[in-house]
Amino acid sequence: MTTGRTVETRGPRFSQIQVALADDHPIVRQGLRAVLEAEGDITVVGEAADGLGAVEMADKLKPDVMVVDIIMPGLMGLEAVRQICQRSPRTRCVVLSMHANDAYVLEALRNGATGYILKGSDSTEMVHAVRLAARGERYLSPEISAEGVETLLDKAQASRVSDPYDALTTREREVFQLAAEGLTNLAIAERLFISARTVEIHRANVFRKLNLKTQTNLVRYALRRGVLTIE
């Protein structure tokens, strides 16, 4: 069952690189589809309009590569990437983002992304990133310092500081983002197909683990963490 999210399938696997797209803007998905399907070796097998749909689609279709927008409703792209890599290990994720700062890139790579490409990149760069990802090779847009990111990755692994956010379960992270977006417990329950009482428990766990007291605290934390953005 889907919740307004789009899943499309087409064609057998053959030797094609099967790609799925996740972006909340239809015109962006249409543009990406046109660029990728102009190549003889790439087939777009599905589209999703939010993060939850992206995870659902990856679990169902197991594409070779998923192109995931970093900012989406329901579940941010970085968390979607983490869940996709856990549930469909053979699927490589390429993050599409307007943010070139090291913090976002680092989080994407830590969550399992194989590529990180900036919006505004030309079509040849996107195709190149997808082909490399299909082979399991990393690609970062030229504007991103690969050496700087590697240094940050090494430091993060060498001195892993306990982060309260890491203690949240997958379901708690989903509830956290939806709550930060302002959805009520009932609306969250309907979105995630769980009971309102279960949402209430997850929300309480989020507040406890992150040491938050109010909804305002939760929103501010979400903004600092990059789970919620103001566009």
Image: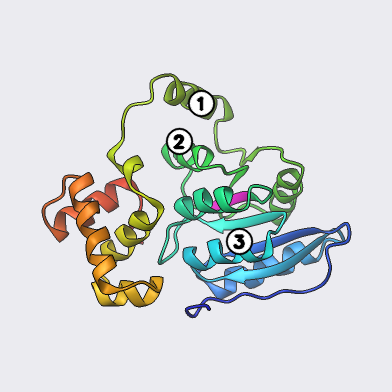
Q: Nearer the viewer, mark 1 or mark 3?
A: 3
Which quadrant holds residue 67?
bottom right
Q: Name the residue: 15% across, 49% down.
A: 212
Depicted 206 relative to depicted 4: above or below = above
Please check the rendered image and state whether residue 117 is part of the magenta-colored stretch, yes or no. no
Q: Is residue 131 left or right of residue 183?
A: right
Residue 96 in magenta stretch: yes
Q: Which residue is mark 3?
A: 59
Q: Which residue is mark 2?
A: 102
The CA distance from mark 1 to mark 3 is 33 Å
Cα separation between marks 1 and 2: 8 Å
Q: Which residue is mark 1?
A: 148
Residue 194 position in % (x across, y down): 36, 71
Q: Is residue 95 left or right of residue 11?
A: left
State the SS at label 3. helix
The span from disc 3 to disc 2 (Cα, nearest Å) is: 29 Å
Q: Amino acid at mark 3?
A: Asp
In the drawing, does residue 174 fall left or right of residue 7? left
- Secondary structure of the residue carrying tag 1 is helix
Q: Amino acid under label 1?
A: Gly
The structure residue drawn at horizontal position 72% and vertical position 54%, both measured from the top left corner, is 64
Tell me where the magenta segment starts and ends, as one range.
93-97
Determine which quarter of the picture holds residue 120: bottom right
Q: Which is more toward the observer, 223 or 168?
A: 168
